[in-house]
Image (cartoon, rainbow, N blue to C red):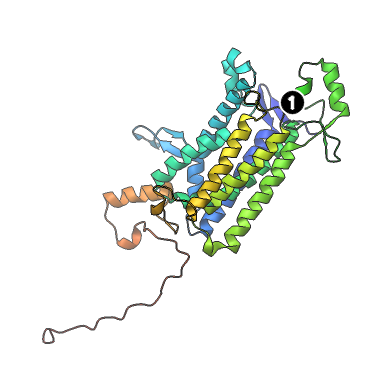
Amino acid sequence: MINPIIFSIGNFSLHWYGLIVMAGVIVGALLAERELIRRGGNGDVIWDVLVGWTDIGPKMKFPFGAFQLGLPLGVLPVGIIGARLWYVINATIGGNRTYLDNPSEILRVWNGGLHIFGGFLFGAVALFWLLRKYNVDRWLVLDSIGPAMLIGQGIGRLGNFVNQELYGPATTLPWGLKISTLYSYQIPIEMRDQPVDAVINYLATTRFHPTFAYEMLWNFAAAGLLLWLSRRHASGLKPGTLFAGWLLLAGIGRTWIELFRPDQPKIGDTGISYSMAVAALMAVAGAILLMIRYNAINFPGAENWEDEYQVEAQGADAIAAADTTKATPVMESETAKVKTASRKKAKTETPPRKPKTTRKEK
């Protein structure tokens, strides 16, 4: 098995898990950028919202240049905070008192981990705020990042394999996973109160459902389906369809996966985990959004939704350009223009010129 720690220098350790997660983020962002450009948008928007650097306070000038304080309020940093908080809350609900007895452990992200639902929730708040700030069509970006999130999350699941964690119950199936007794970050729930020797012997003689692999394969298959639909039926898809598809497929997949996750805290004696309930709500929300988008049900306010993407001057550069335009008037060709992406071909015929008239003809 692979040692989860790549190397350590003093108190600092570089983990494979963090490296793999970041690889998933980068691959997902590259795919989202490509999808956004394919729809007529500005691919730089993806990187603007991912980092979301926001200036705060006045700009200070020094002999060596100007300086201004700022905060990274993009989807990635805010999402990591949300993912950590959700993990802490979920673990605490499950009976883990580590974070109540020692709150400083909350900051030690490498001890414990992250929960993707917290990343979705907090990341969504940052995303919608930045899209409004950059004046970008929400549906345009959401449809571009839907398949990309599935790909990125699927890649991230490889980190669970390296950590030997998030596996399911014992199984005799041929693809059952053998858990390393050296590097496992998780103790089977049925062995948590047993002596160390008994746990080691149990791990050495038992195979488990690789639930992280199930979710990874599901995510890749769902992403492939959405990408195929986006190309095969491009002319018939309304804005928001692929995002709704992500909600539906990601929710269904995670609901099913939770059946193989005995480590997740349950809602009372129902046998339903909190994560399963959230995943099911995601799937329901995706199904409702699809029905609203295709007029299967009526929803107040939905009648004003655009049937075509609105591609506008986008991103942080567009904001800077707009500020410059207000300060110094320039020619129309040099300003940021607003465009509308339509699936219908625009007419290219030029109107006939009106003949000039002389004073005698008037």
Residue shown at 67% from the left, 22% from the top: 10
User: For this rendering, which residue is in front, 170 or 290?
Assistant: 290
Q: Please give left or right for residue 261 compared with residue 343 in the image.
A: right
Q: Name the image quarter holding the C terminus.
A: bottom left
Secondary structure under the numbered disc 1 in the rendered image: loop
Query: Residue 41, position in %: x, y?
Result: 47, 56
Query: Residue 168, position in %: x, y?
Result: 75, 32
Structural crowding at the residue carrying mark 1, measured as other residues with C-alpha within 10 Å and reported as few (<14), some (14–19) or many (≥20): some
Q: Please give left or right for residue 304 compared with residue 288 in the image.
A: left
Q: Name the image quarter holding the N terminus.
A: top right
Q: Amino acid at mark 1?
A: Gln
Quarter of image, res 307: bottom left
* Residue 100 visible in the displayed image: yes
Residue shown at 64% from the left, 18% from the top: 95
Quarter of image, res 163: top right
* Residue 313 visible in the displayed image: no
Judged from this view, the residue extending furthest toward the left is: 360
Compared to residue 38, the image places residue 194 above or below, namely above
Judging by the rendered image, the residue that carries numbered circle 1 is 186
Residue shown at 34% from the left, 63% from the top: 333
Query: Residue 282, position in %: x, y?
Result: 56, 41
Q: Please give left or right for residue 264 compared with residue 103 in the image.
A: right
Report the number of discs: 1
User: For this rendering, which residue is in front, 63 or 280?
Assistant: 280
Judged from this view, the residue extending furthest toward the bottom is: 360
Query: Residue 332, position in %: x, y?
Result: 31, 61
